[in-house]
Amino acid sequence: MDKKAPQFPQLFLRIALAVTMLSAVADRLGLWGRNSAWGNWEHFEKYTAQLTFFLPPFLSRCSAYVATFLEIALPILLLCGIKLKITATATGILLLIFALSMSISLGIKAPLDYSVWVGSAAAFLLAAQKKNPLQAK
């Protein structure tokens, strides 16, 4: 079997995860316009409060900022291939937390509709891969 065969699927998975996460950030910043999930930061904070109903309002607001920071930093690291195993694992954990929060607060259908479980599993699968030649040192 060709040793270079895994390069494209791994790269494709890195790009798909990164673009998906960055698209969510673009949505909450209003860059996707009116036909989007949140459309602006205010609606995203309300959505975050719904998912983190068990947290005090201040921590809920903080979680919106932390999630956004991670949803910018992790995709950039994925695209660059920096510390890929750690980055992919962190991405999987972030998406798993999101999927569990959605399941608890909105029911199991919501994370299934948005493929959050699939994204989390894909990130963990990426983390389990042997070192990719396209990965940064």
Image: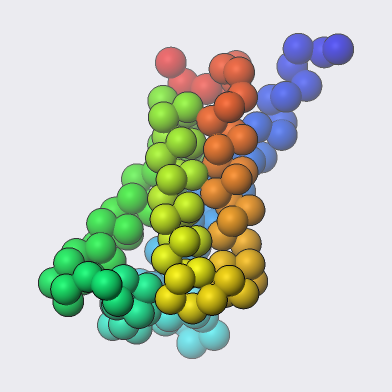
Hey, which residue is sitting farthest bottom in the picture? 34
**Residue 35 seen from this side:** yes
Q: Where is residue 43 in the image (x, y as percent from the top left)?
A: 34, 83
Q: How many marks?
A: 0
Q: What's the colour scheme?
A: rainbow
**Residue 31 seen from this side:** no
| Corner quadrant of residue 109 | bottom right
Taking 52 as reference, is 36 left or right?
Answer: right
Q: Where is residue 88 in the image (x, y as percent from the top left)?
A: 48, 36
77, above or below 67, in the image? above
Camera-side residue of 105 and 115: 105
**If the image is split into quadrants, where does the C terminus sit?**
top left
Hey, which residue is sitting farthest left in the picture? 58
Residue drawn at 46 percent across, 21 percent down: 136
Residue drawn at 47 percent across, 53 percent down: 95
Residue drawn at 65 percent across, 32 percent down: 10
**If the image is split into quadrants, where does the N terminus sit?**
top right
Hey, which residue is sitting farthest right in the picture? 1
Q: Where is residue 102 in the image (x, y as percent from the top left)?
A: 47, 70
Q: Where is residue 28 in the image (x, y as percent from the top left)?
A: 38, 73
| Corner quadrant of residue 108 | bottom right
29, above or below 74, in the image? below
Taking 96 as reference, is 114 left or right?
Answer: right
Residue drawn at 61 percent across, 43 percent down: 122
Taking 137 as reference, is 8 left or right?
Answer: right
Camera-side residue of 130 and 109: 109
Camera-side residue of 55 and 48: 55
